[in-house]
Image: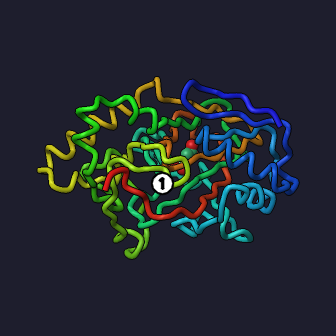
């Protein structure tokens, strides 16, 4: 197995492994160590069937149900998919893709998924990259004064914030009612590293701050965390499997490809635990 770091802060490409085959205990432990260190792992040339994908992604944890069963494979209910065919078009004909601004998945759940993963099954001739930013490095770079100000703040995450920059998918009433107060600064349960926990599509201000003050703070932290210096942009190749840690990075999709072309990705999420506040 060979590991090549991709960017300064995070993300690594792992080669010399065939994820269609089960891995032994030592390989599993090493892959989990790498995932903890890099937060985004890229495996090229993995033409996985859905059961092989399920097996591969469970190296890192336990599969969980997607929030919309509409987008799951009929014979493999824990494997979801993102398909161009299901995407609504905007008035100008361009695509409205799922996840089109930086976010961390299901942040309005009591225990958000610890990981999300995609496998490229069909790709457009250009575009459709996925971008990631390292919210651990972004936290580390804040001034001591700002760190002290945000240390114990919390935000209520809802299905769709009243100031969301994008329209969220319509789900069942039960799913849409999910709402959770989450710390603004979290501590990773394994590495202990601190990270910003942001999702402008779901954050309904900051508890204990006036609405405008809360949203201004969220937007300032979001602008800081989404700078190019914290980014890794993944240009997909067929057969890529990527898995990322939702407590260490935010991700966003891109709608910049020809709507007549097909982008089809398998998608899986791994069960998480309630977030840990960095400071009590
Ligand atoms: C997502 O936000 O989960 C989708 C990312 C992508 O399709 O690139």
Residue beneath disc 1: 105
Q: Is residue 61 visible?
A: yes
Number of dots carrying numbers: 1
Residue 28: x and y, percent?
77, 52
Quarter holding residue 101: top left
- Could you tell whether 50 is left or right of 113 in the image? right
Residue at 41% from the left image edge and 27% from the top image edge: 227
Q: Quadrant of the C terminus?
A: bottom left
Q: Quadrant of the N terminus?
A: top right
Furthest toward the bottom, the residue is 174
Give whichever of 234, 185 is nearer the camera. 185
Residue 89: x and y, percent?
47, 47
- Could you tell whether 220 is left or right of 225 in the image? left
Residue 242: x and y, percent?
66, 44
Residue at 81% from the left image edge and 49% from the top image edge: 27
Give whichever of 147, 67 is nearer the camera. 147
Q: Is residue 95 visible?
A: no
Mark 1: few/some/many CA within 10 Å (<14, 14-19, 20+): many
Label 1 CB-ligand 1 distance < 8 A: yes
Q: How is the image coloured?
A: rainbow
Residue 58: x and y, percent?
71, 60
Residue at 27% from the left image edge and 55% from the top image edge: 155
Residue at 27% from the left image edge and 54% from the top image edge: 154
Q: Secondary structure at mark 1?
A: loop
């Amino acid at each position: 197995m060979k590991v090549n770091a991709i960017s300064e802060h995070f993300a690594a490409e792992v080669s010399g492994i065939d994820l269609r085959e089960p891995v032994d205990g030592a390989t599993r432990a090493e892959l989990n160590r790498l995932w903890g260190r890099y937060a985004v792992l890229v495996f090229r040339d993995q033409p996985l069937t859905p059961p092989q994908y399920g097996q591969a992604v469970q190296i890192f944890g336990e599969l969980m149900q997607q929030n919309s069963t509409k987008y799951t494979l009929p014979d493999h209910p824990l494997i979801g998919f993102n398909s161009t065919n299901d995407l609504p078009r905007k008035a100008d004909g361009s695509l409205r893709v799922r996840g089109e601004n930086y976010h961390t998945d299901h942040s309005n759940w009591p225990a958000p998924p610890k990981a999300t993963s995609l496998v490229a099954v069909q790709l457009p001739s250009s575009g459709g990259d996925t971008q990631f930013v390292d919210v651990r490095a972004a936290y580390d770079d804040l001034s001591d004064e700002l760190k002290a100000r945000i240390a114990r703040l919390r935000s209520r995450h809802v299905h769709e914030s009243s100031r969301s920059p994008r329209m969220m998918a319509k789900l069942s009433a039960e799913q849409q009612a999910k709402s959770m107060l989450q710390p603004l600064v979290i501590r990773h349960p394994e590495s202990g590293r601190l990270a910003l926990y942001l999702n402008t599509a779901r954050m309904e201000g900051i508890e204990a701050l006036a609405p405008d003050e809360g949203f201004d703070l969220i937007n300032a932290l979001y602008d800081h965390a989404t700078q190019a210096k914290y980014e890794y942009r993944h240009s997909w190749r067929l057969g890529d499997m990527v898995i990322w840690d939702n407590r260490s990075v935010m991700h966003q999709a891109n709608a910049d490809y020809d709507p007549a072309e097909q982008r089809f990705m398998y998608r899986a999420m791994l069960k998480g635990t309630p977030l840990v506040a960095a400071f009590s």
